[in-house]
Amino acid sequence: MDPIDRKILGLLQQDAGLSIAEIASRVGLSQTPCWKRIQKMEQAGIIKARVALLDAKKLNLGLTVFVIIRTNQHDDVWLQKFARVIKEFQEITGIWRMAGDIDYLLRVIVKDMDAYDAFYKRLIKRVSLSDVASTFVMEEIKYSTSLPIETPGAP
């Protein structure tokens, strides 16, 4: 990947709705070579998807919760069930398997505390967990979906 590819990716991370003509102009290419670069990055899986980012608060989804999960079960049967069940919850917008004291970290976005309580009850009913702790976001200071592909001093 060269600096032009990185510039293309940076532009797409800022606005995936840009036209090929606009992207090509900004990176100093004609449209066809620019489009071919984008297609190549899509085929390689570097560009996973092009999506619209929505404003959760304007959609009445005002509560973000980070859920810390610990379990005593680490066998394959439990792991498969956990993965299957977790994927069914639309409220879960991110999940990570962790190293250290925490087994899993979930990001959950819901309307309010009542909606979170209902989510929590459905979750613990569906899968066996040894400990669940929740932390509630009071203020979002920084949130980005952009990856740091243009690092200072990088070629």
Image (cartoon, helix red, strand yellow):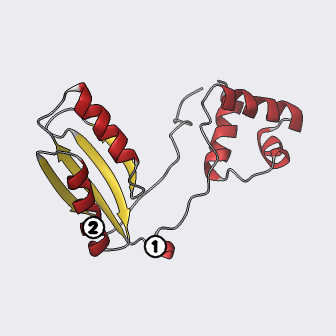
Q: Nearer the viewer, residue 72 or 55?
A: 72
Q: Nearer the viewer, residue 66 or 152?
A: 66
Q: Nearer the viewer, residue 38 or 94?
A: 94
Q: What residue would you read off at disc 1?
A: 57
Whether 114 is drawn above or below 30: the answer is: below
Identify the disc placed on residue 118: 2
Using residue 81 as the reference point, say whether residue 94 is left or right of it: right
Q: Is the N terminus in the top left, top right, bottom left or bottom right quadrant?
A: top right
Whether 122 is drawn above or below 31: the answer is: below
Contact between labelled residues 2 and 1, with CB atoms less than 8 Å apart: no
Q: Position of residue 93 (x, y in %)?
A: 41, 52
Tell me the crowding category of disc 1: few under 14, some 14 to 19, or many 20 or more residues within 10 angstroms, Cα based: few
Q: Amino acid at mark 2?
A: Ala
Q: Secondary structure at mark 2?
A: helix
Tell me the crowding category of disc 2: few under 14, some 14 to 19, or many 20 or more residues within 10 angstroms, Cα based: few
- Spatial distance from mark 1 to mark 2, Cα to Cα? 19 Å
Asked if residue 30 can be seen in this view, the reply is: no
